Amino acid sequence: MSLKNSNKIDTNKYELEIAIDSATFCDAIQKVYKKEAKNITIKGFRKGKAPLHMIEKLYGEAVFFDDALNYLYEGALLSAVDEAKIKLVDVEKTDVTSVSKADGAVLKVTVVVEPEVELGEYKGLKAERVTPAVSDEEVQAEVDRMADRNSRIVTVDDRAAAMNDMTVIDFEGFVDGVAFDGGKGESYTLTLGAGQFIPGFEEQIVGHNTGDEFDVNVTFPEDYQAEELAGKEATFKCKLHEIKAKEMPTIDDEFAKDVSEFDTLEALKEDIKAKALERKAKVADEDVENQLIDAVVEGMKAEIPEAMIENRSNESVREFDYRLRSQGMDLETYLKYTQTSIDDFKATFRPQSEKQVKVRLALEKIVELEGLTASKEEIAAEYEKMAASYGIEVEQVKAALPESDVVGSLALNKAIDLVKASAEIKEVAEKSEKKAPAKKPAAKKSTAKKTTKKAETAEKPEETAE
């Protein structure tokens, strides 16, 4: 198999003429014949025992030509691409211009290739790094969260219900004095202030004591999903069976001993602060890297073929499906629950896919310009690192991941390191931000209470640039 001609016919598009010699083609026919013969019956021969020449006599000499070409196609294409020194993105069209046992076959393949890339400045770039700082308030907030995680739920019988309490209630809803479907519940656990029920419902339980029977009057939102209830006034007859509340632990040295390896609260706080500083430093470093890469991409010139972005978006969809399956769901179910078409869903990945493609092209150009590669020692260390990460043998990693992929990944990392090493980084103080109050969720499907679908809680994975 060989490349006869390589012609650039348009921007990012080549036509390759590939020759498959007679010996290779005939050998492929033999392989296909051995695989398919077991399914062929010819009179006078046992099933699967008919010789090739008899099958060809009966069905024509070209009976296995298509299968033989399919068998050889990928290897022939990749060999031709390598010989043409182009980077394949997609195959647009394939034509068989001639084929015979005597002469082999000639293919004409139109391919889309990676674009020519021109970079602007990628050394001496400027970026700002936020100097990490952790306030006493942040440390205390983490201590409070730890206390909340170690709280216990106790039954309250010496006061009325208050916001954030967990209550156990019976309820039945009426519109114009008539009970409606789905508006009844018994021994239902409701956390006041969680926004589980329609607006105004939970607030009217506040102030009632265990054993109280009372009415809750509400108006369904105009955009309520159950159209027969939308905008209607309703009365829920309720009975409060139980009030429960969180009992928080005392935050002192004993608390620190219970929740950590430290003997004092002060030591626990120092550890929390150190870990928070480490996390913020990592985020600050990543932000600097992103600023620099964005600057490199901004200065890049390249006519990127749509197929590159499309391929990356498809990969993102497959990765998302894989994550869903690990959670016991699949993409088809997710799309059904979210009432989203596959095309609309894939379109949500386009911005990040476009950026990832641009970043990879820019870094690959730096690798090319700087002659960056990886040493045998670096390659071995990377395999060791991956094996340790996955808890498998190094040879298993090598079998699954070609060395060329490892070399490529290490070279891209070196390109990033080169850009960072030459950059001018200015340290700036961290800005304090006031957090906006959390919005109360809007009422959803059902009558009194909301429903939370598993699919609606699945988040799209955060994608990183290649």
Image (cartoon, rainbow, N blue to C red):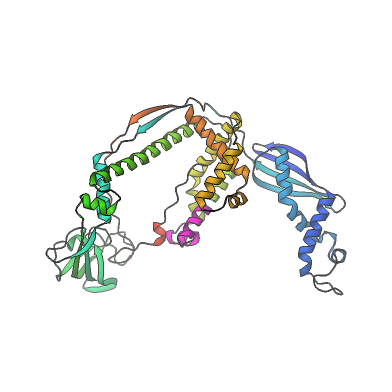
Indicate the position of residue 51 as horizontal and vertical percent values: 85, 66
Above or below 270: residue 163: below
Identify the residue at horizontal 52%, vertical 45% (top origin).
385
Above or below 30: residue 312: above
Most frequent secondary structure within the magenta stretch: helix
Q: Quadrant of residue 32?
A: bottom right
Indicate the position of residue 41 as horizontal and vertical percent values: 81, 72
Left or right, 385 with reference to 189: right
**Residue 184 appears in the rendering:** yes
Identify which residue, 174 or 100, lies in the foreground.
100
Indicate the position of residue 272 as horizontal and vertical percent values: 30, 44
Identify which residue, 177 or 402, lies in the foreground.
402
**Residue 436 appears in the rendering:** no
Q: Among all residues in the image, which is located at the extreme front?
A: 263
Q: For the magenta stretch, what is the residue range?
A: 318-340
Indicate the position of residue 166 as horizontal and vertical percent values: 22, 63
Residue 379 sits inside the magenta stretch: no
Left or right, 383 with reference to 169: right
Q: How many marks?
A: 0
Q: Quadrant of residue 11?
A: top right
Left or right, 165 with reference to 116: left
Identify which residue, 325 or 346, lies in the foreground.
325
Left or right, 98 with reference to 10: right
Above or below 110: residue 127: above
